């Protein structure tokens, strides 16, 4: 039985601590849309998405109204388009059909312009990856991802090298908008099939026809909870986060089950990630500072993030029958007011962010770097992140934005949830000979760990 205090507590979380459901994402299988020509495939893709997701936005708004829970985004993810377009190679035509479907259904973003090349690349996958810059520049809502490594297969360094070039090309094609195309492109190691968050969402080959995945948020709620235990030891801190994560996840579980029921879709997972926004009081960085750091990036930051990530998962798992996605804490720079402040104060560097990705939910996320950064340096940063993910058997990712025409000391403004970011310096020493070697980094041995 829920008592009055718990009801009031939840209302307070929503009203003043930014508790919300960050996204309802409908994942749709497109395997039955494969046609003989680009035109027929694109039309079938458009028709199926519009048919299954026509009520997605309205349903999200209805649930928000019925339960008083803000639902910020409604999104769609689809089967990796590299597979759907392999027969006809009409990838750009399909990308434009995806964008039209996103506009028709009224969703915020649509993810799944994706390739999975962690072990090798076919000719059509190589061609698909080359279309990514044009696809992102010629659409508004389509998001793209490429998985270039996995713990089982190692790191595809040919794909890693290629992605440095693709990110630079995407930045150039969208230079009139501060290279925003790169904000819709993520490179993964160990990508997951049921992630509801963009830009990396896609519907994996093991998923159903129409699946509802929900991502919760709530950094502000965790921070306020920790304010009440200032001075207590870290066991109390972890326990407080765990109990708070339980409450946050129960909200997500309720919304996910109700959305799946109303949309006649399968309930997939609740992603336990704490997703920040640029709003004051909705920051993962400020949670870490509440634990006792003068500023995020200080020595101790990685330990604090590890405590947070572990406690969030422990609390969330108790609250939902199906958890998945990325589940942990996101540490994007541009989307987190505390991270932005840390960069501007000089406490947070690219190297410290990389260290934090060893224990966080994803990786180097929404980081603006100088527009003249060489593509092989970007590839080397991707390789470093892949190594962390592959060796530690976790998901890692890179979403870098080399902003054309801007350099360190300047700032880029994306607006909305994408926020703003100071341009961060990168190490200028050259990794060219390493990247040019290509090939595949062997999968690690996990039976002899230390």
Image (cartoon, grey):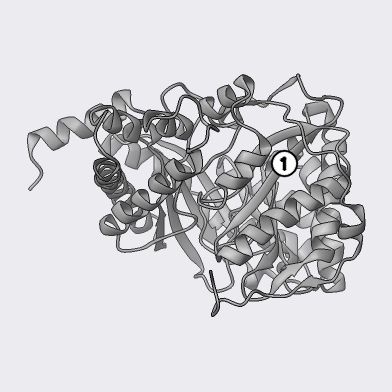
Could you say where residue 436 lies in the image, as x and y percent from the top left? 92, 60
Please tell me how many numbered marks the rendered image carries: 1
- Look at the image and tell me whether residue 434 can be seen: yes
Q: Residue at x 26, y 29 (%)?
A: 231
Q: Which residue is mark 1?
A: 400
Seen from the viewer's position, the closer of residues 435 and 104 is: 435
Toward the bottom, the furthest residue is 447
Q: Residue at x 78, y 74 (%)?
A: 120
Q: In this rendering, would 246 be left or right of 101?
A: left
Could you say where residue 19 lies in the image, as x and y percent from the top left? 35, 34
Could you say where residue 248 lies in the image, as x and y percent from the top left? 30, 43
Q: In this rendering, would 201 be left or right of 265?
A: right
Q: Quadrant of residue 60?
A: top left
Seen from the viewer's position, the closer of residues 418 and 449 is: 449
Seen from the viewer's position, the closer of residues 176 and 294 is: 294
- Look at the image and tell me whether residue 38 can be seen: no
């Amino acid at each position: 039985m829920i008592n009055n205090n718990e009801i009031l507590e939840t209302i307070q979380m929503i009203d003043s601590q930014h508790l919300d459901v960050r996204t309802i994402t409908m994942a749709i299988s497109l395997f039955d849309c494969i046609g003989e020509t680009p035109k027929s495939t694109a039309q079938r893709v458009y028709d199926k998405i519009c048919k299954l997701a026509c009520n997605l936005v309205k349903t999200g708004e209805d649930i928000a109204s019925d339960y008083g829970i803000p639902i910020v985004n409604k999104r769609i993810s689809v089967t990796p388009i590299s597979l759907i377009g392999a027969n006809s190679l009409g990838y750009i035509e399909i990308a434009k059909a995806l964008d039209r479907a996103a506009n028709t259904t009224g969703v915020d973003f649509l993810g799944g312009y994706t390739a999975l090349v962690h072990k090798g690349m076919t000719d059509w996958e190589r061609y698909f990856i080359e279309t990514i810059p044009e696809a992102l520049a010629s659409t508004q809502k389509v998001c793209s991802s490429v998985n270039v490594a996995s713990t089982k297969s190692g790191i595809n360094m040919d794909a890693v090298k290629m992605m440095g070039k693709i990110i630079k090309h995407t930045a150039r094609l969208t230079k009139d908008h501060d290279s925003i195309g790169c904000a819709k492109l993520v490179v993964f190691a160990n990508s997951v099939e049921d992630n509801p968050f963009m830009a990396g969402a896609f519907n994996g080959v093991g998923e159903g026809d129409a699946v509802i995945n929900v991502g919760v948020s709530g950094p502000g709620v965790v921070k306020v909870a920790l304010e009440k235990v200032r001075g207590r030891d870290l066991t109390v801190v972890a326990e407080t986060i765990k109990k708070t994560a339980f409450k946050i996840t129960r909200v997500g579980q309720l919304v996910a089950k109700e959305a799946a029921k109303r949309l006649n879709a399968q309930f997939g997972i609740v992603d336990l990630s704490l997703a920040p926004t640029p709003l004051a009081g909705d920051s993962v960085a400020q949670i870490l500072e509440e634990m006792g750091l003068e500023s995020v990036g200080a020595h101790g930051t990685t330990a604090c993030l590890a405590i947070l990530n572990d406690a969030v998962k422990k609390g969330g798992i108790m609250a939902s029958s199906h958890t998945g996605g990325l589940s942990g804490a996101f540490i994007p720079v541009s989307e987190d007011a505390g991270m932005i402040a840390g960069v501007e104060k000089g406490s947070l560097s690219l190297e410290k962010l990389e260290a934090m990705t060893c224990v966080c939910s994803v990786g180097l996320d929404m980081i603006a770097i100088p527009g003249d950064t060489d593509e092989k340096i970007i590839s080397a940063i991707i390789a470093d992140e892949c190594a962390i993910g592959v060796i530690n058997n976790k998901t890692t990712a890179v979403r870098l934005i080399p902003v054309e025409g801007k350099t360190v000391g300047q700032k880029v403004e994306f607006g909305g949830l994408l926020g703003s970011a100071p341009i961060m310096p990168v190490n200028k020493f050259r990794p060219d000979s390493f990247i040019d070697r290509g090939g595949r980094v062997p999968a690690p041995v996990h039976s002899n760990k230390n």
